[in-house]
Amino acid sequence: MDVQTQFQLKSFNTLNLNAVVSHYTQVHSQNDLCEALAYAEQHGLNVLILSGGSNMLLPSHIDALAVHMQIQGIEILAEDNTTHTVRVGSGQIWHDFVLWTTEHQMYGLQNLALIPGLVGASPVQNIGAYGVEVGEFIDYVEVYDRIEKKLTRINAQDCHFSYRHSIFKDDPNRYVITHVVFKLLKQPNLKMNYGDLKTAMGDDITAENLQRQVIHIRQSKLPNPNEYPNAGSFFKNPIISQAQYNALSESYPQAPHYPQGNDQVKIAAGWLIDQAGWKGKQLGKVGMFQKQALVLVNYSDADLSDVQATYRAVQQDVVKKFNILLEPEPVLFNEIGLIQSHTT
Ligand code: EPU
């Protein structure tokens, strides 16, 4: 196994943060992974799992073994009257896999086109867009369990998928995802109710057109990470109580909101940030994007402390105006490669 030292991860995280890791290796199979984990144990190193890097906040120096997941492959395992079961390596590029499903008349994931990152990261935060979450189409996830020290599988119902959440977030340093197994539909069941998607579809009510329109909407609002390094939505849309929403709506009846049942209401974080004056505003090297205030952009060679200065200023201004604390969405790593909470 090939281990490189003092390795720069700047081009492997989509925010392009300067981040040098003490040890780095690539993994192309489950065997490689077991070897890498054994190496880390022998050398007393923590393991930092690196996927597409589109949802990570990395400090500038990390003492750990970065394990870069590159397991490839798309395999059709089974079919029945209504579904295809497909096993995908965690290192496949998510968007390319979505395009592949559409080309092969397998339906469900089209609303999730153009989400950055790799397949293995998709269950972690239960990626979602335009009324669909990936958890709806996952059959099971193949993982290496670092506590039990074995390869195993976790069925979708045991993943506890919810809005931008799963057990992989509850227990962040335990599982390494090697494959995701999807159950995809033979007949499309189009979800077109989000925002202006239905209008954008026109008369062409097909999965292919839905995918095309989602790509078009995303390209028109979201910055291309190659041009403006970013990590997608930087904050989760906050969920508040009905009573808190009622109070908010007295002053701001126009606030976009989505009732969740159970006396809870989801509020659009992008709107809150926009109203707090942060749309297109920059603090030092880092700012909130001009066309979508929810996206934080690294405008010039920032490191984690620059990102933290900006997002804390945004949080403060939103708390001051609305008394709502926004929770960052990307995963925060510490100097020894462990995932840590944003609040400690
Ligand atoms: N809004 C503003 N100003 C802004 C941005 C948004 O007023 O600068 C308002 C919009 O007008 C709209 C509302 O906020 O009324 C919601 O905005 P939008 O429909 O653009 O979606 P979002 O809530 O900002 C979420 C996801 C996105 C996903 C879209 C579409 C989260 C945190 N974000 O964004 O996911 O693509 O819906 O489904 O749930 C991601 O997770 O990286 C991501 C891009």
Image (cartoon, rainbow, N blue to C red):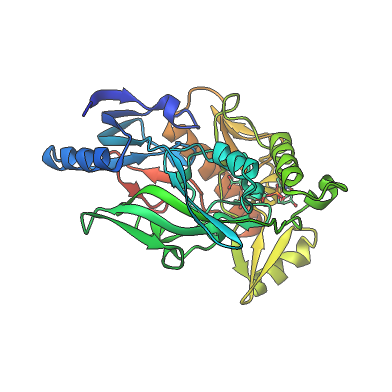
Q: Which residue sits at x=44%, y=51%?
A: 180
Q: Quadrant of residue 150?
A: bottom left
Q: Is residue 266 above or below residue 310?
A: below
Closer-to-camera residue (221/117): 117
**Percent x, y of residue 315:** 56, 49
Q: Residue furthest left?
A: 42
Residue 124 in sight here: no
Q: Quick check: 88 left or right of 285?
A: left
Q: Residue furthest bottom?
A: 262
**Percent x, y of residue 327:** 52, 53
Q: Which residue sits at x=55%, y=43%?
A: 313
Closer-to-camera residue (41/265): 41
Counting labels gives 0
Q: Quick check: 18 left or right of 30?
A: right
Q: Which residue sits at x=46%, y=66%?
A: 160
**Percent x, y of residue 321:** 66, 54
Q: Quick check: 157 left or right of 109?
A: left
Closer-to-camera residue (172/303): 172
Closer-to-camera residue (160/62): 160
Q: Quadrant of the N terminus?
A: top left
**Percent x, y of residue 33:** 26, 41
Q: Which residue sits at x=48%, y=23%?
A: 301
Residue 96 in sight here: yes
Q: Quadrant of residue 282?
A: top right
